[in-house]
Structures are given as structure tokens and as C-alpha cells.
Image: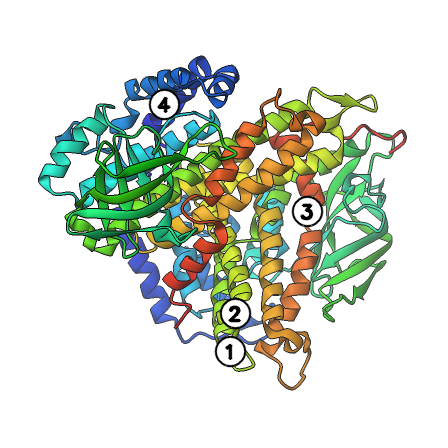
């Protein structure tokens, strides 16, 4: 029995962290947030060179065929570095969906290119989880019409993976006719978001996706990626709060020697530490197809979103006025955690789902 | 990541299951120290299901320290209504202390009867003016010939009305700094000069006592460790108590009962669990519990696998576990509404008043065993490396 990360997983995490601290320091994040797409592309290329795009692609299609635990390790490291790169949608949800439900042509066309970092697929499941603005798509005779909001990794993507209300998944080439892309500007400038308006656009169904278990697995995977991203970002916010409290003096003392500040930090640590274990456990449950894997994925996303919210608030407070400034840049982590919370279902929405999963309605 | 215990443990598990099956009919009813209880305790020891790693010569089973076997025993016993091994502060705190720091004579004399449940211990730590600041305790111990003479007052002493022995902290070196002036003594409770007064709690029960000690004389050799080392000796066992206060597996059982309760109780004919806000609160608690269960697996793993660090994971167990449990019991009361306030033997009472009783009892545990505010000091200082509060002159 061993509960934790392997040496290989730990060194992967270290490699990503080192790459990001060398190549995506706060100045670079600020540049990306101010619209320097070239900088974002450089960082994106770097993570492809680290092999991150092919992590979830089967070996037979040129990938590394690793598991969810590895993917959460990556996501956590990217969250810690507020990395301005595609990941959860393009390199986890999309390859999982195509591997599980694509036909041989679809797999051959997309999986090797995902693994090689040549193609990015944006993923839109928001309307399956809970449609806003009356959005949604319909599939009819090989064409898709309708709207989808808040695609993950959708900006400048080569293709889109969309779900209809019954959970079927469709692939659309982004160069097809009838697509209007509208950029959605969110608080989190380290990632992008788009809205698609589709008017009879050519689309192919992933044939296996008529089985609802496919979209459920894709959704579980996405939620765990967002949770891991929040855990990584929250850990940095806690570490920064403790470090700041050991530098800043008031009333002739380090503020970190005041119990009010110590207890804020202890509360953050007490909430966050179990979340690392929870992510590993939930990812392992997916990898081993455990009976309660879906419930764990739901509860992990819901719980970690709550913990992230608390930590992003408390850490900012420990920093006092500096925490509120753009200069310090703490807000990039705050906002990243804020977006993760809402994507693929806010805690209340997901807990509702977790109740149904356990048969509370009966 | 590997959550399997391995095939080598399958045989052991079936052995435990067989034992439980054979003894399914055992029911214990007499008071503590009753012969039937002592015999059952001894049977558990003889089979290696209790005191497993305590050496044979001190009354234990004399087995290896195999954490997974202990876990399997706990898992299987938890599934059955079969009587569990007796606990208490003697078994959980004193025995480990004597095993690591006691003299050979002390081990011979005390461990066996304590394990068998024949000798009950109470803990003499807190004083009216020394709660969170335990090291400021003032109960005096003076050596007079070959006897310690003890004078002072202790409080929050559990099971003192039943105990034959007390492990007690007393100040024996009044001129030394406060942490270096304390000794750890073993005091027979039938000594002259001990006055026990029960404290009635908010629950209506009396689990604790005050002890008034006036010229209590005990043999000089009844000391564990050296003079002035009592603080270190006591700290070696406080960890044992904190870990046992908030086991997430026990909380899981309570959560299951809460789900049943919310499916049964109705408001205007609608099940409480079908009311969205109640259901959301229930599911929030479940999410928090799942995080704590994962945390517990990490701690277990760190005990088996050398080099795996779980320091912070351990420090937070008492804080997180007691707070969650208190909230869980509180949700049950809210789910029952006015019915949740019923107590003692009132009509309409649910589950013998257990929810209300446990709700209040866990507030006691949030305070006891080192208050949760003290836990936050410990987490921030020992795990996060934050400084202690500046010392106040004279404290």
C-alpha cells in the first residue's frame, strides 16, 4: 500500500515548476495578460516540448498513455505557475473523448496531432452541465447549429469538441463555414474563453458518445483538472501569505507573530493539506475505475472550489493593501481560482449532481 | 499509488473474519473491571487483536508492529457489533509512555493489568489556572524522605470516580523554567488526601472530575523519567490522544446515520433530504469528510512507507475532525427542527437523544485535548514555521 505520488510523478512536477519559473515569471504572465500573444505561444511551445500534450494520448497514437494521476500533477503545477497555456480541454478532455468514443478515422486524424502539439481542440461542455443564456447546440444531418459558451482552450483552436444536451459529442473543424467566434473576456487573463455561434456547420459525431458514460468520464477528467489547478494555485497563495507575514513588520513585530495572522494561515493550511490527498485519491479512483469514482470527482471539484475561495480571500487579506495591488500580482492566482470554481459547474450545481448520483431522490 | 494491501494479507483478514464469526454472540454488560470484560479483553490479546505489538512479558501479544494488520483488525471489527477492545487513557496514553520511558519495574507492575482492563487510569494534567498554558501548572510535589508529597488541585480528570491510578504532572523544581520544573508521577487513587468531585457538564452527564490533593503521599520511585522531565514525558503521549479524537471512519458512520435520518424526517410531508438547502449542507459535509478520509490514507501510508512525510497532514486531524463532527451533529438537529431540541426521555425523542448529546459533547472535544485555537498555534508554528507570540514578562 502506498498513497501518494511516485518519484516519476514528483519529478514531472518539479520539471514543470522549473520550466515555468524560468520561462513564465510574473513579468511574463503580466505581458500575456496585457495581450502579448507571442509570449503565450512561447510558453505553450515549451510545455509541448516537455511532452505534456501527449500525456493522455495512447502509445499507439504517439502519446505517453499516462493516467489521470499524472494529469492532475501537471494541472496542479500549471495552476501554481498561473501558466497561460491550454491544458484541461485541449490535452486532457479532448484526447480522452476521442480515445473513448472516436472511430478509427477520427483517432488517426486527431490523436497523433494532439500528442505532437500540432493541434489544439477547444472543449465546450457548459451547456450539458447547465446552459446559460439559453445556449445549446442541435445536430441534424451532419450539421450543428446553435451556441456554446465558455469553451475551454477554445481561442485559436484548430477544432472544437461540443456536447448537446443528451451528452453526445461532436467534432467541428474551426475552419468550417458558418462559425462565428466571440471572445469572452473573463477576470482571469491567464486563460482565454470564447463563445461559438454555429449556423449549420459540418460536424462529425464521436460514435461511442451515445453511451452517456463517455461524457461523464470526460467531465470527471475536466473537473479534476480544474480542481488540481486550484490546489496548485492555492498552495502558492498560502506559501506567499506565510512568506509575506515573515517579512512585514508592524507594531515593532513581524505580522506573522500575531495570532490573528497565524490562525488565518493555520486555517488555510488545515483546509488545503487534505485537498492534495483528495485530488490524488479522486484521480486514482478514475484510473482504477472505482465504484465511487464519479462521486469523488464531483465532491472533489465542489470541495476544492470552496477551499480555493477561502484561501484566495484569506491570503489576499494577509497581504493587506499590497494584496489588492496589481503590482504584487497576487490577483492572478485569485482570479484563476475564481474561474476554475465556475467552469464545468459551480459547487452548488455539482453537489446537486452528487446527491442524484447517490440516489438521494429515491 | 497503490491502495491494495497485497495478497499476503488476505489470509490474515480471513483469520480475523473467522474469529469475529465465532464470537458473534458475545455481549458484555457488567460495569468496568467486571470479570466478563476482563476475560474478553484477554481473549483479544491472546489472539493478537489488541495490544498486538506490546511484548509478551508485559502482557501483550508480542507480535510485530504491522500497521496494515492493525488496520485490517480495525476495519473488520468496525463492521460487526462484536464488543471492541476497551480504550481509555491508561491504555491509549500511559501504556505507550511506560513502554518507551518507564523503568523495568513499572512496566512489569502496570502494563499487564492496564491492558486487561483491571486497572483504570485517569489523567491529572489540567488545573483551574493551567488549561491551554498547561506548563504553568502549580500542583506541588516535594520529596520527603522516600515519598513524594503532593498538594494542589486538578481539573477535567476523566473517569476519576472509577480509576485506581492517576498519571499526574506536578511541579517538583519550582526554581527551574516552567517547562523544566515538572515531573510525571504515578499516583494510587486510594491514597489519603484525595478528594474527588464530579463536574456536571452541559450535556447533563459527569464525565470529568475535580481532584483536590492535600498532603497525598506516594512512593518516590513512582516517577516516570527523571525529575524535571515530566513535560517531555507527557508530550510523548499527547499525540496519541489527539489522533484518536476525530477518526474520519467513525464520522463516516455518523454521516450514514444522518443520511438515513434526513430521508425519514419530514416537514409538511416532504422529506428533509428533498429540501435543496438541507441537501446542499449535507453534501458539503460529505465533501469535507471525503477530504479528511483521503488525508487519513496519506497518514497511514506514511506510517508504512519510510521517508514519506505527513507532518502537516497529522497536525490538522484534531482541528478538522472535531469541527466537522460538531457541524454534522448540528445539521441533524436542524433537520429535526424543534424535535431536535428534545432531550432525556421526552416524547418524540429521536435516537435516544444521541444527536443533541453528541453535538454538545463534540463542542467539549473542540475545547479539550488542546483547544482548536491551540491547534492553530501548533500548525502555524511547527508546520508553517511562524514565530511564537513574544513572551510576557513573568509568565
Judge the density around disc 1: few (<14), some (14-19), many (≥20) Cα neighbours within 10 Å.
few
In this view of the protein, which residue sits in the foreground, A1 or B333?
B333
The answer for how far apart the CA atoms under marks 2 and 1 are is 8 Å
Q: Nearer the viewer, mark 2 or mark 3?
A: 2
The answer for how far apart the CA atoms under marks 2 and 4 are is 47 Å
Q: Position of residue B31 (x, y in %)?
A: 61, 73
Q: Position of residue A33 (x, y in %)?
A: 49, 23
Q: Nearer the viewer, mark 4 or mark 1?
A: 1
The answer for how far apart the CA atoms under marks 1 and 3 are is 38 Å
Judge the density around disc 2: few (<14), some (14-19), many (≥20) Cα neighbours within 10 Å.
few
In the rendered image, the quadrant that contains the N terminus of chain B is top left
In this view of the protein, which residue sits in the foreground, B356 or A293?
A293
* CB within 8 Å, label 1 to label 3: no
State which chain disc 2 sits on. Answer: B
Relative placement, left or right, of B125 versus A183 is right
* CB within 8 Å, label 2 to label 1: yes
Q: Nearer the viewer, mark 4 or mark 3?
A: 4
State which chain disc 3 sits on. Answer: B
Which is more N-terminal, label 3 or label 1? 1
Q: Tell me, for residue A11, which label it has, or none.
A: 4
The residue drawn where x is 57% and y is 58% is B87
Asked if marks 2 and 1 fall on the same chain, the answer is yes
Asked if marks 2 and 4 fall on the same chain, the answer is no
In this view of the protein, which residue sits in the foreground, B167 or A15?
A15
Q: Identify the residue under disc 2.
A: B275
Q: Identify the residue under disc 1.
A: B270
State which chain disc 1 sits on. Answer: B
Q: Position of residue B311 (x, y in %)?
A: 54, 35
Amino acid at each position: 500500500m502506498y498513497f501518494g505520488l511516485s518519484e516519476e510523478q514528483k519529478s514531472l512536477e518539479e520539471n514543470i515548476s522549473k520550466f515555468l519559473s524560468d520561462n513564465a515569471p510574473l513579468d511574463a504572465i503580466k505581458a500575456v495578460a496585457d495581450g502579448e500573444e507571442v509570449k503565450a505561444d512561447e510558453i505553450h511551445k515549451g510545455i509541448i516540448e516537455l511532452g505534456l500534450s501527449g500525456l493522455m494520448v495512447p502509445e499507439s497514437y504517439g502519446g505517453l498513455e499516462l493516467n489521470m494521476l499524472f494529469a492532475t500533477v501537471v494541472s496542479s503545477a500549471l495552476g501554481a505557475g498561473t501558466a497561460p497555456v491550454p491544458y484541461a480541454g485541449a490535452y486532457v478532455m479532448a484526447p480522452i473523448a476521442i480515445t473513448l468514443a472516436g472511430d478509427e478515422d477520427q483517432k488517426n486524424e486527431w490523436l497523433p496531432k494532439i500528442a505532437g502539439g500540432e493541434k489544439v481542440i477547444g472543449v465546450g461542455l457548459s451547456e450539458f452541465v447547465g446552459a446559460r443564456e439559453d445556449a445549446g447546440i442541435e445536430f441534424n444531418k451532419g450539421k450543428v447549429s446553435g451556441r456554446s459558451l465558455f469553451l475551454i482552450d477554445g481561442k485559436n483552436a484548430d477544432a472544437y469538441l461540443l456536447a448537446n444536451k443528451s451528452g453526445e459529442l461532436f467534432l467541428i473543424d474551426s475552419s468550417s463555414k458558418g462559425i462565428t467566434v466571440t471572445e469572452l473576456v473573463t477576470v482571469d487573463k491567464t486563460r482565454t474563453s470564447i463563445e461559438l455561434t454555429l449556423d449549420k456547420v459540418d460536424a462529425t459525431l464521436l460514435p461511442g458518445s451515445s453511451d452517456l458514460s463517455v461524457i461523464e468520464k470526460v467531465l470527471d477528467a475536466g473537473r479534476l483538472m480544474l480542481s488540481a489547478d486550484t490546489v496548485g494555485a492555492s498552495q502558492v497563495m498560502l506559501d506567499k501569505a506565510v512568506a509575506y507575514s515573515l517579512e512585514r513588520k508592524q507594531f515593532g513585530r513581524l505580522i506573522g507573530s500575531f495570532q490573528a495572522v497565524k490562525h488565518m494561515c493555520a486555517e488555510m493550511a488545515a483546509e488545503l493539506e487534505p485537498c492534495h490527498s483528495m485530488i490524488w485519491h479522486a484521480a486514482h479512483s478514475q484510473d482504477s475505475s472505482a465504484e465511487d469514482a464519479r462521486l469523488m470527482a464531483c465532491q472533489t471539484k465542489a470541495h476544492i472550489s470552496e477551499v480555493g475561495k477561502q484561501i484566495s480571500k484569506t491570503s489576499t487579506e494577509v497581504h493587506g493593501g499590497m494584496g489588492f495591488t496589481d503590482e504584487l500580482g497576487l490577483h492572478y492566482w485569485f482570479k484563476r481560482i475564481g474561474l476554475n470554481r465556475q467552469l464545468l459547474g459551480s459547487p452548488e450545481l455539482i453537489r446537486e449532481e452528487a446527491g442524484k448520483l447517490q440516489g438521494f431522490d429515491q | 499509488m497503490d491502495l491494495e494491501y497485497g495478497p499476503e494479507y488476505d489470509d490474515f483478514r480471513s483469520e480475523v473474519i473467522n474469529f469475529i464469526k465465532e464470537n458473534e454472540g458475545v455481549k458484555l454488560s457488567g460495569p468496568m473491571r467486571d470479570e466478563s470484560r476482563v476475560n474478553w479483553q484477554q481473549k483479544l490479546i491472546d489472539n493478537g487483536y489488541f495490544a498486538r505489538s506490546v511484548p509478551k512479558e508485559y502482557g501483550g501479544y508480542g507480535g510485530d508492529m504491522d500497521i496494515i494488520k492493525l488496520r485490517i483488525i480495525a476495519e473488520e471489527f468496525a463492521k460487526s457489533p462484536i464488543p471492541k477492545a476497551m480504550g481509555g487513557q491508561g491504555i491509549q496514553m500511559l501504556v505507550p509512555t511506560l513502554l518507551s520511558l518507564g523503568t523495568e519495574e513499572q512496566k512489569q507492575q502496570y502494563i499487564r493489568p492496564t491492558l486487561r482492563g483491571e486497572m483504570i487510569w485517569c489523567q491529572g494534567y489540567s488545573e483551574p489556572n493551567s488549561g491551554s498554558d498547561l506548563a504553568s501548572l502549580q500542583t506541588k510535589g516535594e520529596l520527603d524522605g522516600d515519598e513524594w508529597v503532593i498538594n494542589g488541585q486538578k481539573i477535567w480528570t476523566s473517569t476519576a470516580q472509577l480509576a485506581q491510578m492517576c498519571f499526574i504532572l506536578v511541579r517538583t523544581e519550582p526554581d527551574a523554567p516552567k517547562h523544566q520544573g515538572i515531573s510525571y508521577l504515578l499516583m494510587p487513587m486510594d491514597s489519603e488526601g484525595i478528594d474527588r468531585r464530579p463536574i456536571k457538564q452541559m450535556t447533563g452527564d459527569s464525565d470529568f472530575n475535580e481532584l483536590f490533593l492535600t498532603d497525598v503521599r506516594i512512593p518516590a520511585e513512582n516517577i516516570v523519567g527523571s525529575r524535571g522531565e515530566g513535560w517531555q514525558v507527557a508530550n510523548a503521549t499527547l499525540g496519541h490522544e489527539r489522533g484518536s479524537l476525530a477518526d474520519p471512519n467513525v464520522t463516516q458512520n455518523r454521516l450514514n446515520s444522518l443520511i438515513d435520518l434526513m430521508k425519514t424526517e419530514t416537514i409538511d410531508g416532504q422529506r428533509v433530504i428533498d429540501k435543496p438547502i438541507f441537501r446542499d449542507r449535507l453534501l458539503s459535509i460529505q465533501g469535507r469528510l471525503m477530504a479528511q478520509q483521503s488525508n487519513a490514507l496519506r497518514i497511514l501510508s506514511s506510517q508504512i512507507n519510510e521517508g514519506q512525510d505527513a507532518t502537516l497532514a497529522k497536525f490538522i486531524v484534531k482541528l478538522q475532525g472535531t469541527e466537522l463532527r460538531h457541524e454534522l451533529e448540528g445539521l441533524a438537529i436542524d433537520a429535526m427542527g424543534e424535535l431536535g431540541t428534545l432531550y432525556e426521555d421526552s416524547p418524540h425523542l429521536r435516537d435516544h437523544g444521541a444527536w443533541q448529546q453528541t453535538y454538545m459533547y463534540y463542542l467539549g472535544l473542540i475545547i479539550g485535548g488542546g483547544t482548536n485555537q491551540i491547534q492553530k498555534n501548533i500548525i502555524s508554528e511547527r508546520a508553517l514555521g511562524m514565530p511564537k507570540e513574544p513572551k510576557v514578562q513573568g509568565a
